[in-house]
Image (cartoon, grey):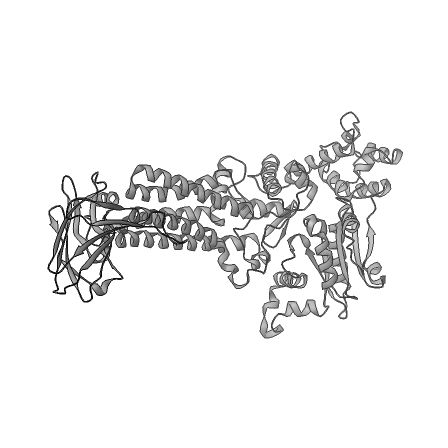
Amino acid sequence: MPEFLRSLPRRQLVVLGAPGAGKSVLALLLAWDLLESWQPSEPVPVLLSLSSWRPSIGMRDWMAQHIKGLSPGLADRRRFGKDVATRLVDGGRVMPVLDGLDELPAALHASAIDAIDTAVAEGVQLLVTCRATEYENTVRKTGRYLTRAAVVELESVKPAAAIAYLEHSKVEGDRRWGGVFGALRGEPDSVLAQALSSPLMLYLARTTYQESSTDPGELLDRRRFKTREEIESHLLDGYLPAVYAESSDPHCGAEQASRYLAVIARQMQRDGTFDFAWWQINSLVTGPLVGVAFGCGWGWFSHALFGPALGIVTGVVTGLLGYIAHARIRAKLEQVYVTEDSMHGPRATLPRYARISVLSSLGAACVTGVAAAGWLIGVLEAGPMAAWRHGALTGVAVGVATLLGSAWGSYQVSRTWFSLTRRLPWGLMAFLDNAHGLGVLRQTGAVHQFRHARLQEQLSGEISPSARSAVETSSSAGRWKLLLPLLPSAAQVGLAMAGLMAVSVYYAGMNDVRLDFLSGDKPSIGFTPCVGPSCSIKPTVEMEWMLPRRASRYTTLTPGRTDGLSFIRWNGTVSAYGCATASVEVTLIVGDHSLAPFVVDNDDSSGILLKDKAPLPHAVRLEDQLVSVGLRRLDERPCDLVFRWANPGLGWDGLEGPRKRFDIAASATSS
């Protein structure tokens, strides 16, 4: 292959083949052979898996990132300077050996071909592997292909070559394969010969029947194996028992390993990826547990303020929102964003995201606790001890929920659940390391992949997924990408805080009671309709009293409702007009409680807001008592002064219930 590649006019090659035809092994061996015979004038071959590339990052940038991950020593700026990996790629000093174009989603095949064609200059050696069907479909449907590359397709293994491979692999004197060899020679077109025509199936056959106690002659049973697919499925079923028979792990036999790997394969199939990362482990109990934690925290806080009914509603709503947010983030594999993590192994990323998860949960707990306590002190006027106690408990609950919903927290919950239900081992990382050492899995950066995609299909019971990467490789987030793992927590906490503020505004704002005329000096009553998009639905009610020189007026009013309300302020706007420099003294009385008189001048025609000017000294609960207003003209001007009261009313304490629960009396400034 090295000689053939060098003989091509443009030294670029696409290798096609059927599943299991040996494309990845060919890429690996070619890179190895080129390195063995490498000359200083030639580029250095670097084997890269295309499954982690996405159009959001340039092909050259992606290659440079992976080269830095494969060669950490290049980070030495004093020796190599800045961005040496990028300079090597741009200077044509790297030969990309790009394995698995078919492992990208089908919609990205054309984009990947264009990106490779643009990124790799003419004359630079290049190898790309792809399944034949996928490459041919892309060329036929989009017209995109690698314009400077020759294309070859790997042939299937002929019976003679298959016999030679198996003969070379068996122990001298082993006669168990005689029947199989005879069938391959005598019937080169049989289903057995078709099944053993791929390197993968030959390897599986050798591995499955390497023990002397096994009988490869069973492959000749035509009643049991009627099709090529049935033979391939049988070989795949026997692969793991054969591999794990030699495992040094006494706690994980072949049956357990098959069960564990099947769970992993189904998680990968569910997420539509050839990559397996630890943050993909997700049990059915994790999302509901996150929702319950959020719901219990905010439901308890709402119950403490507004009673059981609103507490239950708040708990259900916030719990549902927390569950939906967690499910959405998890479904898109967006719990781990940091691009550089794709260059490190799984064990390196796990403690890193443990720290991120703990810090984000502590941040959420502190923000929630301080905000809740501040609201209790500032709005409800609760005592510091009670406020901080409730704030701390709510913050702890939200912090726990945030931790459970984080990448690391979800992994720990799911790992525990799967371990208890015997679907995954408790030491998952050790199991993955062992599977990697046995050749069942391969490791690419922060993720593992099944070394054979057909094995993943067999274990998951489905065809290959429409592949996507489990690692976020987008550079569009820029410098903010480090904050992205915190966004789910911030969104959940922000929504809960916004709900709390909305509830407090509703209870504190919808608390006006209108005053109507009952007896005494009757004012003229008018209604001014509100015009314009910013107006409220109700018209403005206006009461006006005419005050000649030295006149006084006294009017008794009645609130539209009392029903045990605690009134804490006057509502409406007062003003005077019609007589320059004139003034009137106003006395407002609620039941037996009289406010200190205040003066309204003709110059105050723009209006004085009573809720700020005339709060009650303390909450007043009206039973059979009435409300009255006294007016007295103070000046000696001969003209008539008109006193106007727009929207006359009383404001009741909308947060009286929460105050009672905290044993707080409403003050004059409560609103």
**Camera-nearest residue between 529 and 466:** 529
- Residue shown at 51% from the left, 52% from the top: 350
In the displayed structure, 73 sits above or below 229; it is below
Quadrant that contains the N terminus:
bottom right
Q: Position of residue 169 (x, y in %)?
A: 77, 43
In the displayed structure, 212 sits above or below 505; it is above
Image quadrant where residue 337 sits: bottom right
Q: Position of residue 264 (x, y in %)?
A: 59, 41
**Camera-nearest residue between 452 and 328:** 328
**Camera-nearest residue between 601 and 527:** 527
Question: Taking the image as drawn, is residue 654 in sight?
Answer: no
**Camera-nearest residue between 59 and 229:** 59
Question: Taking the image as drawn, is residue 187 in sight?
Answer: yes
Q: Residue furthest right?
A: 186
Q: Position of residue 531 (x, y in %)?
A: 38, 53
Image quadrant where residue 639 sits: bottom left
- Residue shown at 50% from the left, 34% from the top: 421
In the displayed structure, 238 sits above or below 332; it is above
How many numbered badges does the structure rendering display? Answer: 0
In the picture provided, is 54 more to the left or to the right than 311? Answer: right
Q: Residue furthest front?
A: 638
Q: Residue furthest top?
A: 223
